Image (cartoon, rainbow, N blue to C red):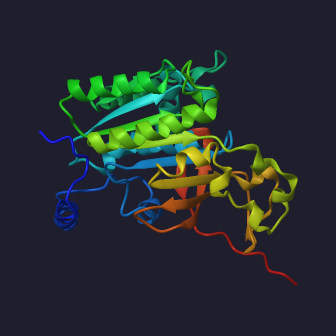
Amino acid sequence: MSDNAWGGQYTAFNEALKYMLDRQSGKEKSIQTPWPKFNDAITDGLEWNTLTVIGGRPGSGKTLIKDQIIRESFIHNPAEDYRVLEFQFEMVGRTSAIREFSSITGKTYKELCSAGTILDQQTFDKCHQYAKTRVKNPVDIISTPMTVNQMREQVDAYMNEHRGQKTIITLDHTILVKRAPYQNNRLDMLFELGEFFTQVKREYPVMFIALSQLNRNIDNPDRAVDGKYGNYVLESDIFGSDAMLQHADTLIGINRPAKQKIRFYGPDRYVIQDDKTLVLHFLKARNGDARMSFFKAAFERMEIMEMDTPPQQIRQ
C-alpha cells in the first residue's frame, strides 16, 4: 500500500459530478430545517459533511434554534435515516426535555415546573405522549464536559457502534469544551476543536452544528447606536473566529437588537418593534449566499418563527 497522501484530480471531479447527479435525483438530500428562508440561504438545508457554527450573545436564541432544528428534523425529513448525537455541556438533559414540553404545550417552563402551579391532566398527558413519540427518534446525549481528544474517542466509538450511520452531531457550546493539560489557553483548544470538526466530517457521514459565544467587541457602546453598520454581527465577533472560521462551512451570527436598545437596525434602519425580534446574519455560506434574515422568538414556548422583513424608518 502506498504512503502517498495525494490523490488524482480526476477522482475529485468524478466525485463532484456524482454528487451533483445525486442531488438532482434526490438520492443525496440536505436536512430541512423548519424555516424556508434558513434552508434557502444554505443550499436547501443543512448538507452532510459540513460544519455550521451559530454564534450569539447569551439569551439571543442560539440554543433555541439548535434545539428546534433537532426536534423538528424528524418531522421535516421523514424519509431520511440518521441519528443525533448531542454534546450538551450547558444544560442537563432534563432541562432540555422540559423546554421541549414547553414548546408543544405553549406553557412556560415555570408553569410546567413551579410548585405553586397545578398542572392539569391534559397537559401532563400531552407531555407524556410526546415523550413516548420522541424516544423513538434516535437521539443520544453526552452531558459530561470533556476535552477534544475525549470527544474524538466518543465519536469514533459511537460511529463504530452504529455502523457508520448518518449522524447529526451538535455541540452546546464550544467554550465549554475542557482544555487539555498541554493547551495553554482556550484559543489553543478552539484550534484543536476546529481540526477535530474537519477530520471527523471527512471520515464519517456526519454534519456538525456548533454553538459559540460572541466576544466582547459586540458590547462596545458605539455599536448600539441606531442605524449603524456596527449594529450587525460580524465574523470577527464570533469567539475564537480565527480558529473556527477556516473550518466552518456555514457561519451564522445572531443578534437580538432590543437587548442593546437598538430601535433602528443597521444602515437601512429596520424598525425593531419588540424584544422578540432576532436577526440572523449568514456571515459565511460556503455553499450558499451571505445574507441577513429576520426571525421572531417566542421564548415562553421555546419556538423560533420566520417573520417578514421589518419596515424601514421613514425619515422626515
Which residue occupies the extreme left position in the image? 1
Q: Tell me which corner region of the image, top left, top right, bottom left or bottom right, holds residue 84.
A: top left
- Estimate the x, y position of residue 46 in percent, counting from the top left: 37, 53
**Image quarter of residue 272:** bottom right
Which residue is more in the foreground, 306 or 252? 252
Q: At 43% across and 66% down in the image, what residue appears?
A: 288
Q: Quadrant of the N terminus?
A: top left
Q: Residue furthest front?
A: 3
Q: On the rendered image, what quadrant is the C terminus found in? A: bottom right
What residue is at 68 percent from the left and 39 percent from the top?
A: 58
Q: Is residue 108 visible?
A: no
Name above or below for residue 190 compared with residue 30.
above
Report the front residue among 182 and 69: 182
Whether residue 186 is situated above or below residue 180 in the rendered picture: below
Report the front residue among 297 and 176: 176
Give the percent coordinates (x, y) of residue 226. Answer: 83, 65
Q: Is 29 in front, or is 199?
A: 199
The x and y percentages for residue 89 are 53, 25
Count of labels in the image: 0
**Is residue 3 visible in this depiction of the protein?**
yes
Residue at figure coordinates x 21%, y 56% from the top left: 28
Q: Position of residue 246 (x, y in %)?
A: 50, 52
- Side of 224 relative to 294 (left or right): right
User: What residue appears at the point 48 percent right and 21 percent down from the top-left corner?
Assistant: 143
Is 238 situated left or right of 194 in this image?
A: right
Task: Determine whether, in the image, residue 167 is placed left or right of residue 87.
Answer: left
**Does 281 sit above or below residue 146?**
below
